[in-house]
Image (tube, helix red, strand yellow):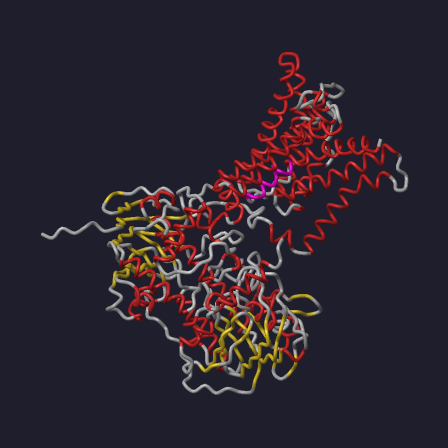
Amino acid sequence: MKVEAPPRLELVGVSKSFPGVRANDAINLKVRSGEIHALLGENGAGKSTLVKMIYGILAPDEGQILFDGALARISNPRAARRLGIGMVFQHFSLFEAMTVLENIALGLDARLSQRELLAEFHRVLDAYHLKLDPRRIVSTLSVGERQRIEIVRALLLDPRLLIMDEPTSVLTPQEVEQLFETLRRLSAGGCSILYISHKLHEIVALCDTATILRGGKVVGTADPRRETSRSMAEMMIGANLKEITKPAERIFGPPKLETQNLSLPKPTEFGVSLKDVTLCVRAGEIFGVAGVAGNGQNELLSALSGETLAPGAEAVILSGEPVGRLRVTERRNLGLCAVPEERHGHAAVSEFSLTDNASLTGRDRMAFVSFGLIDPGKATTYASEVIGAFTVKATGPGALAGSLSGGNLQKFIMGREIMQHPEALVVCQPTWGVDAGAASAIHQAIVDLSARGSAVLVVSQDLDELLTLCDTIAVINLGRLSKTMKVGEASIEEIGLLMGGVHGDPSATIELTEQLHAHPV
Amino acid sequence: MTLEFLIDALVTVIGVTTPILLAATGELVVEKSGVLNLGVEGMMLIGAVTGFAVTLTCGDSLGDFAPWFGVIAAGVAGAASSMLFAVLVLTLGSNQVATGLALAIFGIGLSSLVGASYVGMVIAPFNQAFPAWLAEDPIGRVAFGHSPLVYFALIMVIAAGWFLNRTRAGLILRAVGENDISAHSIGYPVLAIRYAAIAFGGAMAGIGGSYFSMVITPMWAEQMTAGRGWIALALVVFSSWRPGRLLVGAYFFGILMTLELYAKASGFSCLPSQFWAAMPYIMAVAVLAVMSARDVAGSEAPACLGRPFMPNS
């Protein structure tokens, strides 16, 4: 009989409940040594809860965790690190106002002197061919560089199991490739990797085994090399995946939304200035703006929506009319609607009911107001219509926006704008943190809106989303917009290089650091 | 004559500055951990009355050591009152601004109640750290002629700077104030660290308060700290949370407050003395306005300042 080494990590019947939810229900899972094991599931499937238990942030209600065959009690992250478990968080656990080295020191339990720490730091950088300046302040770094801090922090522990929670959601294609190389090198050295994601093609490219979670339960284990993305997606959702239907022949009308040499100074010290942004979205067209976060996306959105006024009226043109000096409500009344990235506090007020949130942007276009007063009946009817048409799961129009899940609130916000029949719609990150079902509904709604002759501009960091959704695409980098490309003609490599952003271009990085250090405080 | 005048003025400035410096050093550490405790004024008064009462009561049995016990008791009382605040804001997650204001009012009331029976009594001032012969000539007076608390305040502000910027424990404390969720997920005990910081802040405020009742005027009077707790709070913002600037800022305010005293005493008549009395407060508002206009104060503040942290939610 062949004797096998015990698995690096084994979970037996692990369960965890929160008030009202059974987040994990009798989970069994085995990760062999040196294996890259995918944990696949939609938002709310229980992936994060599960790894938090493995890393000691949460305590399981039932079940056992075995590490290298021995029963492990992981009462806190420190205990997890002692066992050799490292974790890279989805929302990074970094301290923005501190330096890279201070952030690294905070993640280590050993008391090292500054010099020892620096030596260790460079040893890991060299071993994995990573680049990072230890003296930089985190808030000046790109998202990819920030993730590298987390990875270096985990690697300094010489981990035997590395947990990666949605690591690629904010990276450029090149950064993703770099990350995969690091992970493969690590697994070749015997480290097991638990890789959490809902991006199927990445799992196919990287992982040896995939465990699929749905509703807190394991619904299957698959070999990603034998499955298709589609079959795994269907296991993940538990239903057939709806593909967005897009008319094959797309015919565009006259220009609806244009900017001409739009330049704006940076709004805050950490903001980005817009430089000579010229774009044109025609009726019926979906125009995508790709780019790594913090390259001027939010500034562009404010300039289009009217939150920031353009220097001249001609800088922003809606259906041939100059609107650059008009404010948000005036632009909205002319048919330019916008959905900003941040749902809570920007696109919607969490403490308000859905009816009140509908009134905030719909009052003029949907004629809720008579004699200066809002007609509550009309507002409630409109909110109910949005809820019905976009299958928003909510107790009713009186539900507080904050009580909805991210996906449902996003559907409501998108519905609220789309049902106003805008001439042009500007959307930022339409499916950020939204589950696959809601995401495909939102994508379909955008396609349908454009088919009715509206111009749609979508800003997203998710390149896959833009490539499936858009007709044309441009890349924003350090506040400059690239030339417009037709989707299908532009290669992913080309777009990735344009996205390169702050960290891809060394001179830009230096420039940015100097700018920040030119204002000592 | 002029030299003597300058020396006198300098000694007064040091005296006026010390209690603010003590309280502000404590509050700086508290705020660096991400907690805003607006109750400094109340904690100072509790320290003031406790220090006075303990010194008076122990005076017969302990003699020269009584003031030392008084100061320690003031620190303990300040820390104890701050724990009331800590339980409310940390364990129960109440609003820090409202709770801090409540602590300030509570401290004013409690100290008046406790202090009622001590009104009119006097103790020997706690004002000689070094043997008297060292402080005879003018230079000696400036260097050695003060209460031990003056030296303690200077040591503590330097120690706070060293602790925050040079030690691992200080790094962790700053991390907790910068991003409590991250610190928690890395595995640091956020609430325990904040409890410790609040207790330190309370002790420093209590000792700062005792300076009024044991050094400046060695007697108890209701609300004798006269709003200096609020100045200490402004000073922390003014210093953009840096101990070095805190020291400079404290002396700047000390000079302004001394001007008031001299204006009153000398009948310096080109401006009414009320103008000089208002000066520190006007300057505080002006400096804060200028700094927030430059958006320096905002970006320097610990990112989690005033935000409640509830693990497992």
Examine the image and state in which quarter residue B103 appears. top right
Residue A279: image location, x then y, percent = 56, 80
Examine the image and state in which quarter residue B108 appears. top right
* In the image, farthest residue toward the top: B61
Above or below: residue A163 compared with residue B39: below
Residue A388 visible to the viewer: no
Left/right placement of residue A332 relative to residue A446 reads: right
Query: In the rendered picture of this protein, how many numbered marks are placed on residues?
Result: 0
- Pick whichever, A360 or A323, lies toward us: A323
- Pick whichever, A397 or A287, lies toward us: A287
Residue A227 visible to the viewer: yes
Q: Residue at x 85, y 36 (%)?
A: B263
Q: In this picture, which residue range is highlighted in magenta?
A: B23-33
- Magenta stretch secondary structure, dominant: helix
Examine the image and state in which quarter residue B98 appears. top right
Q: Residue at x 27, y 47 (%)?
A: A67
Residue A176: image location, x then y, percent = 38, 66
Left/right placement of residue B92 relative to residue A184 reads: right
Residue B32: image location, x then y, percent = 57, 44
* In the image, farthest residue toward the right: B269
Residue B302: image location, x then y, percent = 57, 48
